[in-house]
């Protein structure tokens, strides 16, 4: 009988490398490694070779940058998705995409298992497991790091004993995850939420202190909620995001210090660098404020909060999430125009916006000549609008009731 196959989400790091011989030994399975390119700045051919050297029977690399940008980042941008008001969900958004790739390969290869390198403490295990179940309920998910009880040192010994190449590079005290939408940093000194993150924790952003004294303006063009050009140069979304990351990162924009509430109940200190997400979310919100009416903006905000939480919680492939996507998409028809953002020493401020669908009308808003607003109508409006409050107030305050005598408990 041939061995069962397991499709492993492979990053090239120590955990997922050790997972290869571990899966062979403990699940008696052939391991097929899958590495998904979501814009992480690593040499993916080297990662693929390392998977094979670690004992994988096959190793695939999938370039998913465009798919990630268009199918995952764009809906999140249109939903202004910020978990707990601050985290653009960079890591969280990549997990359902990676899971979808694992499922596709598992079906091609007739595998019965998919596997990932997440521990039992984080959000990512929830996202991988739930995304896989949502797409392919027949597959079983294995998380080796949830089963083994090896320390990092144990893992290195295990790797050496099983022919897994261990890089001689001095290991960083941080755990890092990167993709187009941002870079997340955990562990080390960052685990003390009272301590300011040291400069060495950052890689994509210049320290605001060291950033240029000259501000830089970037202009983002949106077409029906889709960013299509930067400073009038059109680019596919994934390239545009990359360009904004570089421009904004150079000005120290996008550093986030988050005291996060994890799905598994733990509070955790998370540090992020999300330059493009910070700029694009600010620009998108500014354009929506210009073209959408108040009640829609207000209702959309409640949807956005729920949306962000669902993404964080790993509920990407669920019917409610699809329904919220449909709502958000329907709000984007008129989100067309340009927004200017000023990058300066760690801040990204919207300084101008323009749209052919602007609800802002100078002839209504102006305090100067050319005013078309019929101000005499305001008095009648306020009379009617204030009627309930006036009627209520006119009845006055009811007299205070005499205090009821308390029962004498000593009796
Ligand atoms: N806490 C963040 C999240 O849940 C980032 C997780 C980073 N993941 C990692 N494997 N380093 O989205």
Image: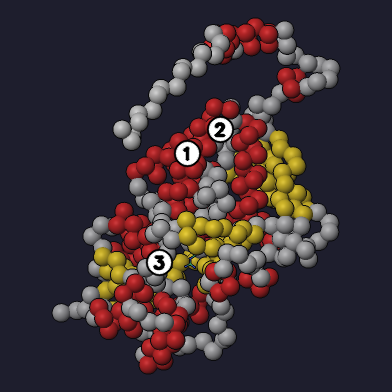
> Does ligand 1 reach within 8 Å of label 2's beta carbon?
no
Tell me the distance, in whole angstroms, between the alpha carbons under discs 2 and 3: 36 Å
Farthest front residue? 411
Tag 1's secondary structure? Answer: helix
| First in sequence: mark 3 vs mark 1 | 3
2 or 3: tag closer to the N-terminus: 3
Quadrant where the C terminus is found in the figure: top left
Q: Rounded to the nearest whole Å, what is the CA distance between mark 2 and mark 1?
A: 10 Å
Give the labeled residue for mark 1: 303
- At 30% from the left and 57% from the top, the residue drawn is 133
The residue carrying pointer 1 sits among few (fewer than 14), some (14 to 19) or many (20 or more) residues within 10 Å by Cα, namely some
* Badge nearest the viewer, 3 or 1: 3
Q: CA distance from mark 3 to mark 1?
A: 28 Å
The percent position of residue 197, horizontal first and vertical second, equals 64, 67
- Is residue 28 in view from this perspective? yes
User: Picture coordinates of residue 37 (x, y %)?
Assistant: 49, 66
Q: Are marks 3 and 1 in contact (CB under 8 Å)?
A: no
Tell me, for residue 121, which label it has, or none: 3
Report the residue at 78% width, 66% height from top.
Answer: 210
Q: Which residue is mark 2?
A: 297
Dot label at residue 250: none
Indicate the quadrant containing the N terminus: top left, top right, bottom left or bottom right. bottom left
Q: Secondary structure at mark 3?
A: loop
Its colouring scheme is secondary structure
Query: Looking at the image, is mark 2 or mark 3 nearer the viewer?
Result: 3
Give the image quarter of residue 169: bottom right
- Using a 10 Å C-alpha cutoff, classify the residue at mark 3 as few (fewer than 14 neighbours), some (14 to 19) or many (20 or more): some
Q: Return the disc, 2 or 1, that comes first in the chain's sequence.
A: 2
Q: Which residue is depicted at the point 31% across and 53% down?
A: 134
User: What residue is rendered at 45% in x and 22% in y?
Assistant: 403
Q: In this picture, is 24 found above or below 276?
A: below
């Amino acid at each position: 009988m041939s061995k069962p196959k397991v499709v492993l989400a492979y990053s090239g790091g120590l955990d997922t490398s050790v997972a290869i011989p571990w899966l062979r030994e403990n699940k008696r399975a052939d391991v097929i490694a899958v590495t998904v390119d979501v814009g992480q700045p690593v040499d993916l051919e080297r990662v693929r070779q390392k998977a094979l050297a670690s004992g994988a029977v096959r190793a695939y690399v999938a370039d998913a940058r465009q798919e990630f940008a268009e199918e995952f980042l764009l809906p999140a941008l249109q939903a202004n998705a910020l978990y707990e008001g601050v985290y653009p969900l960079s890591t969280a958004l990549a997990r359902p995409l990676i899971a979808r790739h694992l499922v596709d390969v598992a079906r091609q290869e007739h595998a019965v298992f998919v596997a990932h390198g997440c521990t039992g403490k984080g959000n990512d295990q929830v996202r991988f497991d739930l995304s896989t179940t949502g797409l392919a309920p027949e597959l079983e998910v294995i998380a080796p790091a949830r089963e083994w009880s090896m320390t990092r040192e144990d893992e290195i010994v295990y790797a050496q004993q099983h022919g897994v190449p261990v890089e001689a590079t001095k290991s960083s005290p941080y755990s890092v995850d990167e993709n187009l939408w941002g870079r997340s940093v955990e562990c080390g000194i960052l685990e003390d939420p009272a301590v300011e993150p040291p400069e060495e924790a950052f890689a994509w952003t210049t320290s605001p202190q060291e950033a240029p004294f000259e501000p830089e303006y970037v202009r983002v063009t949106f077409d029906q909620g889709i960013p299509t050009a930067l400073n009038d140069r059109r680019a596919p979304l994934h390239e545009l995001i990359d360009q904004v990351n570089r421009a904004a990162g150079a000005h120290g924009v996008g550093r986030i210090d988050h005291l996060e509430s994890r799905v598994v109940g733990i509070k955790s200190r998370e540090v992020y660098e999300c330059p493009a997400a910070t700029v694009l979310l600010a620009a998108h919100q500014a354009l929506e404020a210009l073209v959408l009416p108040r009640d829609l903006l207000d209702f959309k905000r409640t949807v956005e909060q729920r949306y962000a939480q669902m993404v964080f919680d790993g509920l990407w492939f669920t019917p409610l999430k699809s329904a919220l996507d449909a709502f958000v998409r329907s709000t984007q028809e008129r989100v067309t125009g340009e927004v200017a953002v000023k990058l300066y020493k760690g801040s990204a401020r919207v300084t101008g916006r323009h749209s052919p669908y602007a609800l802002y009308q100078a002839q209504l808003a102006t305090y100067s000549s050319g005013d078309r607003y019929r101000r005499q109508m305001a008095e009648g409006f306020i009379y009617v609008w204030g009627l309930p409050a006036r009627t209520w107030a006119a009845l006055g305050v009811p007299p205070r009731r005499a205090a009821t005598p308390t029962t004498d408990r000593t009796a």
